[in-house]
Image (tube, rainbow, N blue to C red):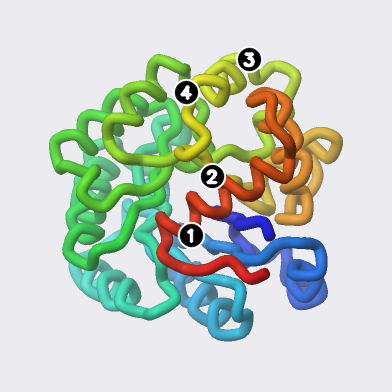
């Protein structure tokens, strides 16, 4: 069974068919899904989803673009959410210098706070890093992020940067971008990264793989990502599933159904 390590089924785009879609997952070979938090409201919706679906788990964290309005009261509430038995990570947290909604200094402050919180609650982290590789790496090194481990979600940096992150005990979330014709840098990085550090993800509803690029994404598209990784690594798709599922089970400390 496939372990999907990053999706956003709390997104309103799924409101009209969420139950119908999620009820097909196990039949289609998806044995576990981690639904990543991004805002306070999203975490409330995630709590409902992980209660409703046995194969779904949650991550509680505030996306860097949503940190501008965070308060100490919000932060205390967030820490409480991390104590839920089906919350398996702190995330997605990090830095995003592509979008300009939130000042980088504020992003850094809350990134640091949430990294330290993950250590306090003994959960791995799900890291969002866009156009912020050096600052992300520097903060993770300074706060010893290797203590909890985690995953660089939607990894998009070079092979050289992958080498730096490997030293921090993190895994690499690989999604639909790996199927894009112009994703040479990512394909080189995936070729370099050991299989025991790779995880499967979609970031649904975003970043659909070829041949569905530009359309709403879902975990049902994971086979396209699996096949591309298998091609790059020179192994079977079945072996990719086996290894990445084992990797995810160890990181999040939950069993994939099937």
Q: Nearer the viewer, mark 1 or mark 3?
A: 1
Mark 4: which secondary structure?
loop
- Residue behind mark 4: 157
Left or right: 174 with respect to 204? left
What residue do we see at 25% from left, 55% from top?
Answer: 114
| Residue 84 sits above or below residue 125 on the image | below
Q: Which disc is residue 9 wearing?
A: none
Question: Does 242 sit above or below residue 169?
Answer: below
What residue lies at 81% left-to-right and 63% top-to-bottom? 28
Regarding residue 239, the answer to whether it shows in the image is yes
Labelled disc at residue 249: 1
- Contact flag, marks 4 and 3 (Cβ < 8 Å): no
Quarter that holds the N terminus: bottom right
Say which label, 2 or 3, has the lower sequence index. Answer: 3
Q: Residue at x 33, y 55 (%)?
A: 124
**Where is residue 205 shown, x and y percent of the image?**
68, 53
Work out how far the residue at label 2 is from the one at label 1, CA to CA, in angstroms.
10 Å
Residue indicated by mark 3 = 184
Q: As drawn, is 26 to the left or to the right of 133?
A: right
Neighbourhood count class around disc 2 (C-alpha, 10 Å): few under 14, some 14–19, many 20 upward: many
Tag 1 near tag 4, CB within 8 Å: no
Q: In whole angstroms, how far apart are the C-alphas of marks 1 and 3?
A: 29 Å
User: 10 Å neighbourhood of mark 3: few (<14), some, or many (≥20)?
Assistant: few
Q: Which of 46 and 65 is in front in this view?
A: 46
Image-based side of 194 in relation to 147, left or right:
right
- The quarter of the displayed image where residue 211 is located: top right
Q: How far apart are marks 2 and 3 (CA)?
A: 19 Å
CA separation in Å, label 2 and label 4: 16 Å
């Amino acid at each position: 069974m496939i372990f999907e390590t990053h999706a956003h089924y709390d997104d309103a785009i799924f409101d009209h068919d969420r139950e119908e879609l999620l009820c097909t997952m196990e039949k289609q070979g998806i044995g576990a899904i981690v639904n990543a938090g991004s805002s306070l409201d999203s975490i409330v919706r995630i709590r409902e989803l992980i209660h409703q679906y046995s194969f779904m788990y949650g991550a509680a964290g505030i996306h860097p673009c949503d940190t501008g309005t965070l308060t100490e009261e919000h932060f205390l509430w967030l820490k409480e959410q991390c104590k839920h038995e089906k919350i398996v990570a702190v995330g997605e947290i990090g830095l995003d210098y592509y979008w300009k909604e939130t000042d980088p200094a504020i992003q850094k402050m809350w990134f640091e706070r949430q990294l330290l919180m993950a250590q306090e609650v003994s959960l791995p982290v799900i890291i969002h890093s866009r156009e912020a590789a050096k600052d992300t790496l520097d903060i993770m090194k300074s706060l010893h992020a290797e203590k909890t481990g985690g995953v660089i979600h939607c990894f998009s940096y070079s092979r050289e940067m992958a080498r730096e992150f490997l030293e921090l005990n993190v895994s690499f979330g690989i999604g639909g971008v790996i199927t894009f014709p112009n994703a040479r840098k990512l394909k080189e990085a995936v070729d370099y990264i050991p299989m025991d550090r790779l995880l499967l993800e979609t970031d649904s509803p975003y970043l659909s793989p070829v041949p569905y690029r530009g359309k709403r994404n879902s975990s049902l598209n994971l086979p396209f990502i699996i096949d591309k990784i298998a091609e790059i690594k020179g192994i079977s798709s079945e072996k990719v599933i086996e290894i990445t599922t084992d990797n995810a089970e160890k990181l999040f400390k939950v069993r994939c159904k099937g």
